[in-house]
Image (cartoon, helix red, strand yellow):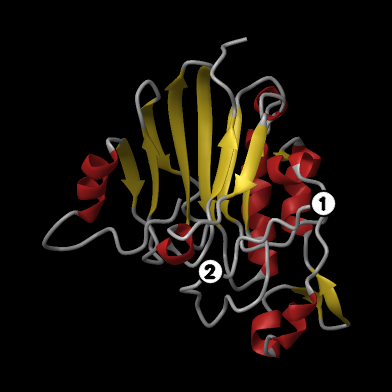
Amino acid sequence: TEVCGFTSPTKDPFQVWQKRLGMKGEMIEAPSGFPLALLAKDPITITSVEAVHKQIFYHGCLSAQVKTPIGDLLVLGVHLNPFDPESRLSETRHISREAHADKNVILLGDFNSFSPSDEVHESLWKLPPRILARHIRDTDHPKVFDSRALAILEYAGFTDLFRTRNPKDPGWTIPTDIGSPFHTTHMRLDYMFATEPMAKRVSKIEVLRTAETKTASDHFPLVCDFGTSAS
């Protein structure tokens, strides 16, 4: 996940929060100033973390090898380009290489993208054109939102976990109470994807909307249960 504000020249808030949460984590820096991190709690352990596709991602892509009671996982955490549909498409084309049907892979993060499975909320049209321009397919079709970035992931073999388990729930992850000038309407921008071996393990996935999460971030978090049995 993105951990903007968790670095400092005088102290390390990320280390402080690891202790408070009783978790261990790894963080990668991003040229954009929006670092990415992964946290885990026993019996889950992170064995390695690296920043990948550095020349492709506007923000970043974190790749982690993780040991869990259900087996070894590859976890990919991403924050896609917020400004340009073509750049997001390029970013997900690179991620799609990891959609190995026989491997345990989880892909999650802020995709800044629309899903081909979602309907566009009417409040989107209240946004100024300079913001809508980040998401439309082209100016000849100004009411067609670009969903190619996520369509590529699904074509490659990743499953949209929330939509599979919640076909009728819009699953909006913004806006929250703290919001931002760009997050003033209902959108699902945050996703969890997985390859088939992990997707079939999911018993529940939801957008966590509580009094705490309304003010914790400008995005609501996703919570997913993959179970604990190795079978």
Q: State the image coordinates of residue 16 (x, y, percent, origin top left).
A: 20, 48
Outermost residue, left side: 10
Query: Which residue is pictured at 67% across the width and 90% down the height?
Result: 128
Outermost residue, right side: 140
User: Alpha-carbon neighbours of circle 1 within 10 Å: few (<14), some, or many (≥20)?
Assistant: few
The amino acid marked with disc number 2 is Thr
Left or right position of 46 against 53: left
Left or right position of 191 against 1: right
The amino acid marked with disc number 1 is Lys
Q: State the image coordinates of residue 12 (x, y, percent, origin top left).
A: 18, 54
Query: Which residue is pictured at 58% across the width and 23% down the height?
Result: 227
Upstream in sequence: badge 1 or badge 2: 1
Q: Quadrant of residue 212?
A: bottom left
Q: Quadrant of the C terminus?
A: top right
Asked if the residues shown at circle 1 and circle 2 are in contact, with their CB atoms under 8 angstroms apart, the answer is no
In this figure, which residue is indicated by the disc labeled 2? 176
Outermost residue, top side: 231
Q: Secondary structure at mark 2?
A: loop
Left or right position of 42 against 92: left
Q: State the image coordinates of residue 199 (x, y, percent, origin top left).
A: 69, 30
Q: Nearer the viewer, residue 154 or 45?
A: 45
In this figure, which residue is indicated by the disc labeled 1? 168
Q: State the image coordinates of residue 3 (x, y, percent, origin top left).
A: 37, 56
Q: Separation of disc 1 and disc 2 at Cα?
A: 21 Å
